[in-house]
Every structure is written in C-alpha cells, then in structure tokens.
Image (spheres, grey):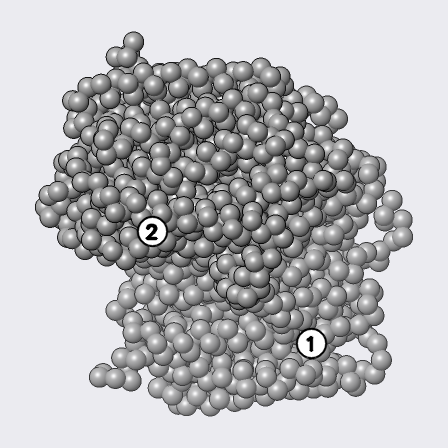
Amino acid sequence: MTGISVIHYVLLSAALFSVGLFGALVKRNAISVLICIELMLNAVNINLVAFNRYVTPETFVGQLFSIFVITVAAAEVGVGLAIIIAIFRNRLSVNLDDFNWLKW
Amino acid sequence: MANALGTVSFWILSAVIIFSALMVVISRNIVHSILWLVVTFLGTAGIYLMLDALFLAAVQVLVYAGAVCIMVVFGVMLTRRGNIRHSNLFNSRLIIAAPLVGLILSAAAYLTAASTDNVPLSDGKVPADTVGSIGQWLLSSYVIPFETAAILLLVALIGAVFLAREVKTDDRH
Amino acid sequence: MPFDYSLITTELIVAALGLAVLVLGLIAPENRQKGLGPITVLGLAGALAAAVLMWNVQGELFGGMFVVDKFAYFFKVLFLSAAILVTMGCTQYVSNMGVHGEYYSMMIFAVLGMCVMASAADFITLYLGLELMTISFIILAAVNRTDGRSVEAGMKYLILAGLSSAALLYGLSLVYGMTGTIMIYDTAQLIVAENISPVLILGLAMLVAGLGFKVSVVPFHMWSPDIYQGAPTPVTAFLAVGSKAASFAVLLRLFAAGLNGMAGTWAMLVAVLAALTMVIGNLLAIPQTNIKRMLAYSSIAQAGYILVGLVSANEAGIKGVMFYSFLYVFATMGAFVVVAAVYNKVKSDEIEDYAGLAQRAPLLAAVLTISMLSMAGIPPLAGFVGKFYLFKTVIADYFWLALLGLIMSMISVYYYLRVCLVMYRDEPKENTPIEIPGNIAVVLMVAMLGTIILGIYPGPLSELTNTAAETFFLH
Amino acid sequence: MNFPVLTICLLAPLIAALILIFLPRDEERLHKAVAAAGTFTSLAISLYVYFSYNRELGGLQFVERIPWINDLGVSYFMGVDGLSLPMLLLTNLIGFSAVFASWNVKKRTKEFFVLLMVLVAGVMGTFIAQDLFIFLLFYEVVVIPIYIMVIVWGSSKRVTKEYAGMKLTIYLLIGSAFLLASVIATFVKSVQITGVPDMSFHGLGQVPFPEQFQIYMFLLMLIGFGSLLSMWPLHSWSPDGYAGAPTAVSMIHAGVLKKIGGYGLIRLAVYVMPAGAAYWAPFIAVLGIAGCAYAAMSALAQKDLKYLVGYSSVSHMGYVLLGVAALNSVGINGAVANMFAHGVMAALFFSMIGFIYEKTHTRWIPDLGGLARQVPRLAVGFMMAAMASLGLPGLISFIPEFTIFVGSFERFGLLAVVAIAGIIITALYVLRAGANTLFGPPRQEYDDLKDIKGPEMVPLVVLGAVLVVGGLLPSLLFDVINSGVEPIMAHIADYLPTAVQIGGGY
Amino acid sequence: MIEFAMHHAWLVPLLPAVAFVIIVFLTRPWPRLSSAVSIAFMLASFVTAALAAYGVFTDPHFKHHPLIYTVRWFGMQGLNIDVGIYLDPSSAMMIFMVSLVALLVQIYSTGYMKGDPGYSVFFSYLSLFAASMLGMVLSSNLLQMFVFWELVGLCSYLLIGFYSFKISAREAAKKAFITTRVADFGLLLGILAVQIIFGTLNFDELTQMAPNFENYTTAGMMTLIAVLLFIGPVGKSGQFPLHVWLPDAMEGPTPVSALIHAATMVVAGVYLVGRNMFLFAEVESALYLVAVTGAFTAFFAATIAVTQREIKRILAYSTVSQLGYMMLALGVGSLTASFFHLWTHAFFKALMFLAAGSVLHALHHKADVWEMGGLIKKMPITGWTFVIGGLAIAGIPPFAGFWSKDEILLAAYQSGHYFLFLLASITAFLTAFYMWRMIFLAFFGEEKPENHPHESPANMTVPLVVLAVLAAVGGLIGTPSTPLWQQWIYYGHPHHIEPNVIIMLSSIALAAAGIGLAYLLYVRDKEKTNAKDLARRFQPVYKLLYNKYYIDEMYQWFTRVVVDGSARITYLFDIYVVDGIVNGSAAITKGLGSVMRYFQTGKVQTYALVFYMAVLVITVVLAFTDASSSVLVMGGAE
C-alpha cells in the first residue's frame, strides 16, 4: 500500500470530525446536533480502526474500542432523543438556542 | 494493482464520506440530513472493509445506518413542528464556527502530517477469524467493559423510556 | 488468566443493588416507593463496607486493564460515602419530586460507573465507566420531567457531554495510535519526553478538554453552572462530588501515570488552567443570586484548587488531590443537603430566600456556613489542610499559582459570606422553625463534624492518603 | 508539667460555648453567666500561669506536645514563653471584660455569646500554640465569628456594618493568603534542607534558610501580619471595622486580635527569617512611622468616637512596628509590651465608648458633651483610657512606648523622632475627644442617663486596674517579656546589622 | 527620727498618694472626712519632709554626696531603669517648700471649696498632685522625673478643668496639657538621647559622666541634648513661646493656681534645669539660650501684665515673668540665685494667689480689678497679706523677693550679660508697677457699692498669715550678711558673690519707682484719667499688650488651619485614596464577575464553541511553544 498510509485515514478522520463539529456548532435543531455528534464519533471510529489495522493488526483492540463506541453512541442517541422529546413537550421547540432559561 | 484499487477506493470513499457529511450539515431539511447521514455511515462501513474490519463494517451498517437512523427519524417525527423544509437551519454562530473549525482542522492536519514517522507501524497479519476473535476478546479480557456496556445500555433504555414517557398528571401524588 | 472475582466485589454489589432497585422500583406499589431510599442506603453501605474491608486486597485483572489498588479503593470509598450521604440527606426531596425507582437506580449506576473509572487502567474501561456515569447523570439531571429547568439541564448536559466525549475519544484514539496500546501504565513506558509525536499534542489538548470538561476546568466549565442549577439538588450534589472526583481519578491515572512522559508539555498548561479556573470560578460566583448556581461556580473554583495537585504529578500531588477530594465530599454534601432541605420548605433556591435561616434552623445555617468556609479554606476547617497539601506540592516551582490560589480562596469568602449575611442578619420572612428529619440531621452532623475533625485532626486521613498514593505508581 | 493547664485554659470558653448551644434561647441572664464563667476560668488559669511562670528559667513552660500530623511534622504543641504569656493574659483579661461590656446585649444573646466564646478561644489558641500549623489553625478561626457579630449586632454610621464587616474579613483574609503562601513555602523549603518535617517554631528556627529566600518570605509574612496589624497602608479595614463592630468585638479585635500580627511578626517572621528581618527592617520602620503620623493625623479629623479610636489604634500599631523594626532587645521588648498595653487601653476605650453609645445612641462627638457630670464613672474609665492612649506615665502604655523609642531611636535616629512626635498629635485628638465628650456644659437630653454599675463596671475595674498596675510596676510585664525576647535575640543575633549608633559607644 | 525621715524620704510622696487612693476608693462620699484625710496625710508628709530637710541641712556631707537609694523598676538588656530617692540640699529644700505650701493650700481649700459638689475629688487631686510633685523633686533619674513630671501635668490638667462644665475651663485644661505635651516631646527626646549616649539616666552616674562627655559624644550632640531637655521646662515653666497655657490655667480653682501654677509645678522646669546643671554647664550655648529665654520671658510677660484687668491673670503673667527670672539665673550659671528666687517666689506668689482667691471668694468670682476697690477695709487680713506679697515681689527690702531678685540681678551682671541684666532690671520696674497697679486698684481707692465683700473664714486666713510671714522673712536666710542659702544650694562650688551695693540700690529704686508710678496713676488720680489717656494715646501698643501680642491667636490659627487642615487632608486622602484603592479593587473584582457572567449565555452551542476554541488555542500554543515537542525540532535543525 504505497499510496494510502495510516495518515490518510487519520486525516480523513480529522476531516469528518471537523465536519461533525461544525454541524454541532451551527445547527439549530437539537436532533441535527445529535446527528453531528454521531459523525464525530464515527470519525473517531475511523481512527481507531485504522490504527488497529496499521499498528496492532494482531489484536482487535481498536476494533473492540470502536464497537464500544458504537454501543455508547447508540445509547446516547436513545437518551438524547428521549430528552429532546421531553423538552419538546415542555417548550414546543427543538431549537437549542431557545433552551436558555439557565444562564448567567 | 491491489494497491491502486485500494488507493482509488479510498479516495472515492473519502469523497463520499466528506461530501455526504457536509450535506448532513448543509441540508435545510432534517429528513435530507438523515438520508445523507445514512450515506456517510455506509461510506464509513466501506472504509472499515478496506481496513479488514469486516465485523465492524457489519455493525456499522446494522447499528448506525439502520437502527440509529430510524430512531432519529422517529425523533424528528415526534418533534415535528412547522415547515419541515426549514427544519434544519443554521444559527448565528456560523461566522465564528466556520473559521474555528477550519483552524482546528488545519492544526489537526498539520500535526497529523507531521507525525507520519512517529506511528509505530506493525507488519503483523490480521487474524482470519475476525468475528470469533472479537467474541473471544469481548468475553475474556474485555468482560468488564462489556458488562459495563450492557448496564449502560440498560440505563439508556430505562432512561429513554422514562424520559420520553408522557408525564401523567397523577405522577406527582 | 485467573479471574479473581473478589477484586470486583464492590462493583458487583453496586451493580446488583442497581438492578434490584430498578426492579423493585418497577414492581413496588406507589406508596411503598419511599422504601427504595433506605434500601439504596443500606446496599451502598454494604458496598462501602466491602470496599473498606478489602482495603488491603490489591491486584490487577486482565493484565492490568482493571487495577484494584488503594488509590482505587480510596476513590470508591469516596463515591460510596458521597452517595450514601446524598441519598440519606435527600430522601424527602426525592419523594417530593415523585420519582423513585429510576432515580435511585440511576444514582447507583452512576456510582458503578465511577467505581469502574477509579479502577480503569485502559482506555476502553475508562471510557465505558465514564459514559455509564455520564449517561446516568444525563438522565438524572432531567429526572424531574415536570420541571423545564431540569429537562433543559439534561438536554445541555447531553449535548455537551457528547461533544466532550468525542474530544476525549479523539484524544484517546490518537494516543492509542501513537503508542499501539490502550493500557495506561504501558503508555507511560512508551511516551518519553525525548520522543513525542506532534499529533500527541493535539491528542493531549483533546484529552485535557474531555476530562477538563468533566471536572469543569475553565474554559471547559461552561456547562456546569447551568446544569448544577437546573438539575435536582441531590443530583447536583452528586454531580459535583462524585462525577468530579471520579474524573479526577481518571485524570490522575491518565496524566500523572500514563502521560507522565509528557509532563513537561502539560504541567504548565495544567497550572495555567488551574489558575484560570480558580479566578473565573470565584469571580463569577460573586454576582450569583441563586445558591445552586453560586455553589456551581464555587465548585468550579474547587476544581481549580484540586487541579493544582496534578501539576506536580508526583505522589505528594496525588495525595493532595485525594485528600482534598475527600474533604470536599463533606463540604459539598453539607452545603447541598442544606440547600435541598431548605428547598423542601421554602421551595426556592434563591439566596434571598435564606433570610433568617439562622433563626429558623440554626443547624442548617451552621452547616452551610461551615461547609462553605471549608471550601474557602478557612482554618481550622478541613479545606485549609487540604489546600495546604495541594499547594505544598507546587509552591517551589509555581509559587505564583499557590499565591493566586490562596488569594482567590480568600476572595471566595466574599460570596460565601453574603449567604451568611442573609442567613444570620436578616429576619426570617416567616417565623416557623424548619424541622429537620432525623436522617437529614445525621447527614448534616456527619458533614459538619467531618469538616471540622478533618480540619483539626487530619493526621489519620493524611496517613491513609499517603499509603493510597504510594500504590499509584507501583504498576 | 503534666497537667494540661493550657489546654484547659483554651477549652474553657469552648466548653462554655457548647453549654450555651444547649441552653434555651430566652435565658439571657444564664447565657451571660455561662459566658462569664467560661472566660473567668480562662482568666484565672492564665493569671496562675502568668505568675507561676519561672522567669529566671525562661523558655517554654507548661509545655504539652502530642504528635498531630506526622507527614507535616505537626504536633499539638502548646506552651508559653515570655512572648506568649502577656498575650495570653491580655486575651483573657479582655475576653472576660468583653462579656461584661456586652451585658446589655438583648438581641439573640445565645448566638452572641457562643460566637464570643469561639472568638476568645481562637485568639487564645494562636498565642499558646508553639507549632506553626496549629497557630494557623487558630489564626483565622476568629474571622468568621467576627463577621457574623458585626453584621448582626454591629452598628452602621459612615459606612454600613455590612460593608465594614465584609471589608474587615476579606481584607484580613487576603492578607493572610500571603502569609499562608509564605508558610507553605517555608515548610517545603525546610523539608528540602533538613529532610525532616517539623512545623514547630523552634524547629523552623533552626533551619538555615538561604538569605534570598528569607528576604522573599519575610516580605510575604510582613504583608500577612502587617495587614492584621493594620500596618500603613494596609490599615483601611481597621477604622471602618471597629466602627461597625459591636463593643465586644471592637474590644477583642483592637485589643488582642490585632496583636496576633505583631506577635506573629516576631515569633515567626523575625525568628525564622532573621536575614529577611534585617533586610526589611528599615522599610518596616518607615511604614511604622508613616502609620504613626498618618493615622494620628487622620484621627484628628474624626468626629466619631469609634473611628477616632480606630485610627488611634492604627497609629499605636505603628509604634509596635517601629519597635520590631529596631531589631534589638529593647525595641522588641517595647513592641511586645506596647501590644499588651495598647490592648488593655483600647479594650477599655472601646468598652467605654460602647456604653456611651448604648446609653446615648450616638458616638458623634459634636452630639455629646458634659457627660462627666451625668455618668462620672464612665467618664473616669474614658479618661483613663484616653490618658493611657496618649502615653501618660503611671499608666501602662508609657513605659512600653518609651522602651520602643529607646530601641528605635538607637537604630533609626532622627527617623524615630517623627514617630515620637506622634505623641503630640495623639494628645491633641485624645484630649479633644475627651473634652468634647465628657466636659463642657451638660446636655439636658442626657440628664437621666444611668451611670455604669454592677456588671457594667467589670471592664472598667479589671482593665483600669491593669492599666494602673502595669504603669506602676512595669517589671511585672517586662521581666516576663524579656525572658522571651532574650532567646530570640540570641538566636537572630548573627544576622543583624550592627546598630547605627549615635555618637560613641553606650 | 531624723535619720528615719531621711532614709524613708519616699514616704514624702507616698503619703499623699495614699491619701489619694483612700479618698478615691473610700471616703469620697464624705467630703469633710476626705479633706481631713488629705490634710492629715499631707501634714505627715510635711513633717517627714521637714525632718529629712533638717537632716540634710545639718550635715555638710550631703552638700557633695547626695543621699541616694534606689530599687529596680524594670529592665532588659540595654535598658535598666531604677526608681529611687535623690536627697540633696536642693531637693530637701524643695520637698520642704512643696509640702508646706501644699499643706497650707489644702487647709485654705477647706474654706475656699466649701460646699462644692466636687469637694472630695478636689482634695484627692490635690493629694495626687502633692505626691507627684514631691516624687518629681526626689527623683533619682531622668525617666522617673519625667514620669512624675507628666503626672503633675495630669493633675494640673484635672485641676484646671475642675469646673469642667465651663467651656473655658475645659479648653484651658486642654490647652495646658497639649502645650506642655509639645514641650515634653522635646524633653523626652532629650532623655532618649541621654539614655542612648550615656546608657543611663541616673543623676549620680550622669554627674560623673557629663564632664567627660567627649568620651561619649560630640559637643554638638551635647548641646542638642541640653536644648532638647530645656524644651520641657520651657513648656512646664511657661517660658516664651510656650507660656500661653499658664494664664489660661487660672480657670482652675484659685487654690490650684496658688499651689500648682505659682508655687510648685511651674517651677518644676526650673528645678529640672537646675537638677541637670551638670549637662547644661558643659555647653555654654545651651546655657545662654536658657538665659536669653528667661530674660525675654521675664520682660515679655511683665509687659503683658501691665495691661491685664483680671486679678488672676495679672498674677499669672507675673508668675511667667518671675519664672523667666529664675531661668535667667540658671542661664547665667547661678543655681543659687535661681533656686533662691524659686523659694521666695513660692511663698509670696502662693500668698498672693490665695489672697486673690479670698477676694474672689468674697466677690463671688468677680475678677476684674477695675470693678474692685477699697477692699482693704472690708478684708483687712487678706488685704494686708496681699500688700506684703506685693512688697515682696516688687523687691522692697527686707521682704523675701528683694534678696532673691537681687541675687539674680547680681548674677546676671557679674556673668557679663549686661543686656540681660538691663532687661531684668526693666522687668523689675514693670513688676513693681503692674503689681501695685493691681493692689491699688483692688484694695485701695473707692469702694464699689455693688460689692459686698467680707473677710474670709479662719481656715483661709491662717494660711495667708503663715505665708505672709514667710514672704516677709523667707529671704533672710540668703542676705549678704547671712549667706546660709548660698552655702548650701549651689552647683559646683558655693558662690561667693560680693554684694554690689549699686545694683542693690538701683533695684530698690526701680521697685520704688514702679510702685510710685502706680500710685500716681491709680491712687492719686482718682478718675484714672491719666491711665486711660495713656492707654488711648498708645492705643496700638496697648491693644497689642492687652491681647498678649496675639500669640494665642497665632497658635489658634496654627492649630485650626495648619494642623486641623492637614488632618482633614490626611483623612480625605485616607478615605478617597487609600480606601479608594481598596474599594476600587473590590469593585473591579465584582465588576469583572458581573461582566463575565454574561458570557454564560445559556446557549449550549456557545459553550461548545468556547470549548473547542480552547482546544484550538491549547493545541496551537503547546505545539508552537513547547520545546519538548518535536514540532519545533522538525522545523529546526533536523
């Protein structure tokens, strides 16, 4: 593999992470932000899997790690959506900027 | 040949992932976003395949592209209000966030590129029985994280049910 | 690989208790739900007893992934004590809220997550412990669904915790990639000062951010005032104590042990962050009018003090962190239990509604005062000794930090005393005394006496933390 | 001495406080009685200790030492020497008097006396602790009770009592932050040098700290102790604080609490950091002198009695600093003695002002006048305090001042003259205050004032007696102090510069 | 008995002190008892003093070897102070005189103060004063002397302000205290310098050291010390320019004026200089300063006295003037003359004050001599004793004042200070004039119908008579033919000054002229037109004199404008600058908190933004500053 090294994957991960971050920072919709966080976690997973492949191919450390990350991410989305639903009932909005009762 | 194929597929997959991810962010309609998200996830699964992580690719498709996205769609439906076409707008932070993220990306890219020689590369072979090995690992060395993850899922489940449940008026005595 | 279950007795008890309470909560009739509180307390006490009894039983599981040393035990004892205190002290608050099973089980699972964190010696265990704790807290923060603020707190915590987890993970993945291991103590050998990959700098920043978020270090602190204010008081209390202490345990393992080779890179950074944290935490606490928010800022400042212990990254520093975290339990629990008790009666967290508390409930006023002063580090209360131990470790190299810390802690007295002013000087709006149920009184007395005794006679705890800190670098 | 006399002395007020907590709220007389009993016990014990202290032997006596925190080398180390003994006695004299000066407190007596007892015990602790750490434990115990007492029982005038209390508290605390930093650094350095943690004053005194280190540390300690001692220009908490505080607090604060600053300066800063002391001495002297003159001038412009005494006490502390800065036996002897003297005098002053305020509801000098006719005993007390304040021979403060003058004149020559000139200004403002308050045509509105009597007389009798006895028999004070100062001087002698002498040898 | 008295001379001051304590703590509610106690103890003290004095004056050994016994007072390394008794002819003379006058004044006061609500207190003060004064006289070292010096000042303060409800009394007391305090500042500095240079304050040791002062210090320093020490007496003995308090001190009850502000306390300064002659004698210039101050004060006060109207004020200025004489004598080096005048002055001035008190008593405190007249008929004892006093002070032989004043003039003349001698002589003339002006106005001439004077009771007149006798014959022990005084009281060696008949005669002539002029202006000229005419003609001078050269006003201006002004400025500086910094930093801290809290917008993505911004900053800073990272290394050498 002369063309593609681990660094390419890491760079891809960085890019994906940045896109996710960008989305998380600029979207109004809470669900959208949640999605973007998932993008960031995905980026991490790319990192983990790539390092697993190139650094520790014999063990599955990286892969295992990403499996757990996926698990946690799923759980987070579940809880997240539940909370979004709860707060939507309360405020009739999913715009994160509306949730500013707690401030200063 | 294999290398060339690998290189080409990497670039294609990368382009797909980044483009779809950008579309996730850019779409003004949240449903479109979710669809683009699926594309991203699928692209990622492709990357996993390239990295010999077959099981993970499968998990990615099942859990992410399937379960999570469906869940999110439900979330959207439950909280839908007003025009769906404008359900996923930008807020006013764009002007700061964009350069910020750009800078983070450049810093990360610069540092990553600078560390090319520092990665402790290994020439080891990937064991053939991926799924079996992962199962072995999970239930031996990684049993504590595994059990913790189990409890975590339980917690998330209970919590999600609890939080999303309609608050009954007689809930409070 | 031998698997010694006895090493995870504490975790097993807690997990079992959590499941039991969850199930009981589901099946118990409405009017019996109150019984869950005592059950929780008893169960946690059992786990605490186990942790204490196992003090000398040390070992590792899975080739060092799960380390059971005195350092871990110490923190487990701390989490469990805090959980017991907060559960006991806030039963009334919880039953007013009307959520039992879910609340108690989440609380217990949060403790479980913390226990896992305390022992975690690899990234995966660490991450899962952390996430178990975090998700429990997200749910706990939003547990009072009828209160918009509570849900908002949950919402904010969810988003920000997700973002910070992503940062943490990203950092962990880079460390993993640059070393090829996820074992913390192995990284210590692999990362040496002479050879640091540039990308590890990014990783380091991400790790600092991710864990700094959990311990609310400025500028990663911004979530905490909002969440502390919005979440139900017992949750806030436990968040302030447990979450913070567990994250410090992880922070110590990760930085003082794992990234010790990079200490030259991060020591100054941590020192600056600690200084920032102290300053911003204290300054922003000054204008607050809501006591929970004020305590939130104050606990940010506390994190700044504790972070000082990390700067030196040696046994003395770790000992300082442990010592301070422990006494911080008493102070914070004392303060928040009072806040909960007052809320039960007054239905307000505004400082102005504490008027005349000294006359309505002298005990509450006294405990709140003493707790706050301990946080400020006024001798002879425990906080003073704790600060002494912490600042002792940096005074030779970072004198400015120690001086700044001491000055800021004296400035903090300003806003603590404003509460005292209202409690002691003002006449109560209504003159009925606030009765204090037995269990709350016990918690308050424990918190108060703990604060005073640790301050006056810190010898035993000091010895204990010394031995615990000694085990830290042994792996 | 196996019997823990000092511990009992320390615990007596605390036990009284504990009893008070369990007494019912409305038993006001009982509260006062318990408080009086507690402080009396301490007073009796400290008198016993004072007079049974072996002056020929000197050194630490009545020692109790129990290991306390091993890794910090801390021990519960109680003992008295010639330095702490007068301060211990002073604390209890004033504590006891303060109870009676508060005899007319009506509001929330229980809390008041609980806090007062804690206050007394805290101050006492600083003076008998021979371990730096234990000293620090007691050092700030008192700040919070004082704050609460000021805001609840204090009085507002030019500034609100809330402001005054907060200023007092925060100011002193921030000052103490510098002290704490230096203490921690000193400790760490000492462990570095000797390898053995030891927090006792004696132990730290034996450590050969590098000179540069001593100079830095001394400065920090000076800021810490100096702000407590209301060293110019760190004094601005003092007048406001005293004005806001209730009588008992003003008495204890001006009387003894401030003295912790001077005491600590000698016991810790000078003793442990002699090279630093030698380096900074001229600077301290200048600040001391500036304080004397400046505060005296400010006092001259005051119309509120408590402000007047507040500034006056700043001025007097200037003398103490000057004595310390002299860094000779005479100067330090004088400084310690002056702390004692000023304590007694200031306490008496504040208690009398307290009574005046209680009875007339004003402290504004132009609103007063002719009280000598209506409340003669009060006037006697006031005048005694005033006379002591201006350093009248025959009362306690003259000899200490004289001693300070001798000590500082020897070292600083003409510089000291400015401070000595302060006695003129002092006389001016003190006499003006006395004259305008007590003398002149009696005012009708005060015709039916009741003179102090019964328990109210206690401060006057106790403190007045000390004023006179100490003035007539200064050796009672000086012999004890000297037995404490001599060892310190012997210890630091090597570091001191040779004295600037006027003319030839002496 | 005599031996006992001498060796227990500490009883002399102690006895009145005991009386003070007894009165204050026990007998205060019973006025008669209090006065009895006071007088009894004073009598005992007087007897002891007399015996001790007798002992001293019968044994020539004491001329050069004072009887000293001391006990340790307090001490430390570098400063040891004793208290003790120093009994030599001078102090023996002083204790005799002081206790005698004090006794007489106390007896007198039983009448004068009768019925006063503060009767007991008054006696307690008198006792305290006597104790302090006697203690001062007997002091064996400078510090002890200073202690009692201040205590007499205190008593003076208390007694001047005895009628404290009168604003004038209150102010006068304050003024007295503060003025003397200013002077004592100098004295204290002097004492400090002595302590530091010689290492001791004991008179006996200092007496040994002073002649060899070069071993210790320079002449300049010695002069400075002497001048500093002299400042104290300037204040206490009412020398120019610190004399201002003394006339005002007349606000006190008249016995007090007699005792303290005429006979005893005010001469303390003279005594102090005399006691420290060994220092002054070493430095010519200091001595000259003393002489000039004395002479000027004598003249200056006399000029003021000429125009004053109140009886006690005239006497007060006369006291200032006479004190100037004494200082002059000291300054020209004659301790003998100075103390001799001190001795005679004590009697005649006490006598005059007491007599004046008797007058005031009779006239219900009407003080203006112009409103009196012809009193001698209604008050013969008072009047004639006053006349004796007047003759004595004017210097008419053979009354006491003549001999002592003559001694002074002689000493001044012989020392070669002719100008001072001239000044002193003019003063003698003025003294006779203003004194007799007062006597003529008050006691002779027409009676004023609105006055209803009556002679005072026996307890007041008896002391007058005793003092009158002493004023008449008290000088006979120092006449040229019987120079007993000169043989006992001196500094160094006895003066054998040849009597100078010319000086003697001229002084008599001047005195007579003064009296005569007074007679012409105030007795012969019934309408006093000439006097009034003179006053009118020299209106500016008259006003200047009548207003005491406006010195009080100058001082008042100084205190009000300079002192109070700078006090005000200091205070404003304190609350606005020093406090301003404190409050300012507090405000900044609080302000920062209040401003920064608004960054906490409550919007979750803002928080996230800050979070990642921090990540960026940390990364960049660490990557580009940290030497241990390889980034820099890569960009550098490698």
Q: Position of residue D84 (x, y in %)?
A: 37, 32
Q: Which residue is pictured at 18% across the width and 55% down the height?
A: E220
Q: Which residue is pictured at 30% across the width and 80% down the height?
A: E632
As drawn, is E246 to the left or to the right of E80?
Answer: right
* Camera-side residue of E460 and B59: E460
As drawn, is D444 to the left or to the right of C277?
Answer: right
Q: Position of residue D147 (x, y in %)?
A: 60, 44
E26 versus E487 height, above or below? above
Circles 2 and 1 on the same chain: no
Type of amino acid under label 1? Ser
Q: CA distance from mark 2 to mark 1?
A: 115 Å
- What residue sits right under mark 2 in the picture? E425
Q: Position of residue D398 (x, y in %)?
A: 39, 38
Q: Secondary structure at mark 2?
A: helix
Q: Secondary structure at mark 1?
A: helix
D498 versus E580 height, above or below? above
As drawn, is E185 to the left or to the right of D389?
Answer: left
Query: Can you tell which mark lies on residue A32?
Result: 1
Neighbour class for label 1 at 10 Å: few (<14), some, many (≥20)?
A: many
Q: Residue furthest top?
A: E1
Q: Position of residue E549 (x, y in %)?
A: 48, 60
Residue C278 visible somewhere in the drawing: no
Residue E412 visible somewhere in the drawing: yes
